Image (tube, rainbow, N blue to C red):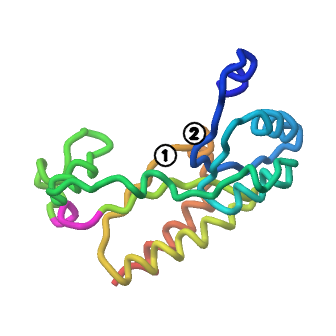
C-alpha cells in the first residue's frame, strides 16, 4: 500500500513499525526502496532501526519511538476489562460469564504475540523463561494472540514440548 501511494505521488510515512525479520535477501532492496521514499520513519525498537540502516536507510531518518499501544488508557473497571479479554476461544463467552475458571477472570491478563526470529526457534525458550519468571512473581492469565499467520500455524511438536516444560517449571 505504501509503494502504491508513493507511485501516486502521495506523501507517506511509517509510524512505530516493527521491521523484520527479513529472511530472504531478495526482499531487502524492495523494502529499502519503500522506506527511502517515506517522508517520515519511526520504528518501535532499536533492532528495527538497525535493520533499516543495514539496508542503506540513513540513521538520521529513523526515529525510535515507543509502541503506541503502551499509551492506551486502561478502562476504569479493570475487572470487567479483564473478563472481556478472556473470551473463550471456542464458545465466545468469558470465564466471568460462564462461571468456568472464575478465579482466572480475576487475574491480570498478559497478551503474548509470538513472532519467530530464527529458524531454530531459539527465541521460544527465552520467551518461555520470561513468562515462567513472570508467573512465579505474580499469578497471571496468559493469553496467546495469533497475530502472525501463517507462521503461528507452523508451531512444531518440539515448540509445544518447550511450552509443556515451561508449564511444568512454572507450576507452584
Quarter of the image that includes the C terminus = bottom left
Secondary structure beneath disc 1? loop
* Marker disc for residue 146: 1
Residue 93 relative to residue 157: left or right: left
Q: Tell me, yes or no, whether the two marked residues, 1 and 2, touch with CB atoms within 8 Å.
A: yes
Query: Which of 43 and 137 lies nearest the eye of the viewer?
Result: 43
Q: Which residues are magenta?
A: 103-108
Rendered residue at 22%/64% (across/down):
104
Q: CA distance from mark 1 to mark 2?
A: 7 Å
Quarter of the image that includes the N terminus = top right
* Marker disc for residue 149: 2
Total number of numbered labels? Answer: 2
Rendered residue at 74%/61% (across/down):
120
Secondary structure beneath disc 2? loop
Rendered residue at 78%/50% (across/down):
52
Rendered residue at 51%/74% (across/down):
165
Amino acid at each position: 500500500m505504501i509503494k502504491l501511494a508513493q507511485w501516486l505521488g502521495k506523501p507517506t510515512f511509517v509510524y512505530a513499525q516493527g521491521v523484520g525479520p527479513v529472511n530472504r535477501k531478495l526482499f531487502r532492496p524492495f523494502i529499502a526502496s519503500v522506506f527511502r521514499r517515506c517522508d517520515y520513519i519511526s520504528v518501535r525498537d532499536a533492532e528495527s532501526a538497525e535493520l533499516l540502516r543495514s539496508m542503506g536507510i540513513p540513521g538520521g531518518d529513523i526515529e525510535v519511538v515507543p509502541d503506541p499501544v503502551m499509551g492506551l488508557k486502561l478502562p476504569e473497571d479493570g475487572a470487567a476489562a479483564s473478563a472481556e479479554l478472556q473470551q473463550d476461544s471456542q464458545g465466545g463467552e468469558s470465564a466471568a460469564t460462564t462461571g468456568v475458571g472464575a478465579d482466572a477472570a480475576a487475574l491480570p491478563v498478559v497478551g503474548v504475540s509470538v513472532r519467530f526470529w530464527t529458524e531454530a526457534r531459539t527465541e521460544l525458550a527465552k520467551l518461555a523463561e520470561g513468562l515462567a519468571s513472570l508467573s512465579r512473581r505474580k499469578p497471571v492469565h496468559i493469553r496467546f494472540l495469533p497475530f502472525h499467520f501463517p507462521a503461528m500455524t507452523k508451531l512444531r511438536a518440539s515448540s509445544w514440548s518447550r511450552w509443556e516444560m515451561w508449564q511444568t517449571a512454572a507450576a507452584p
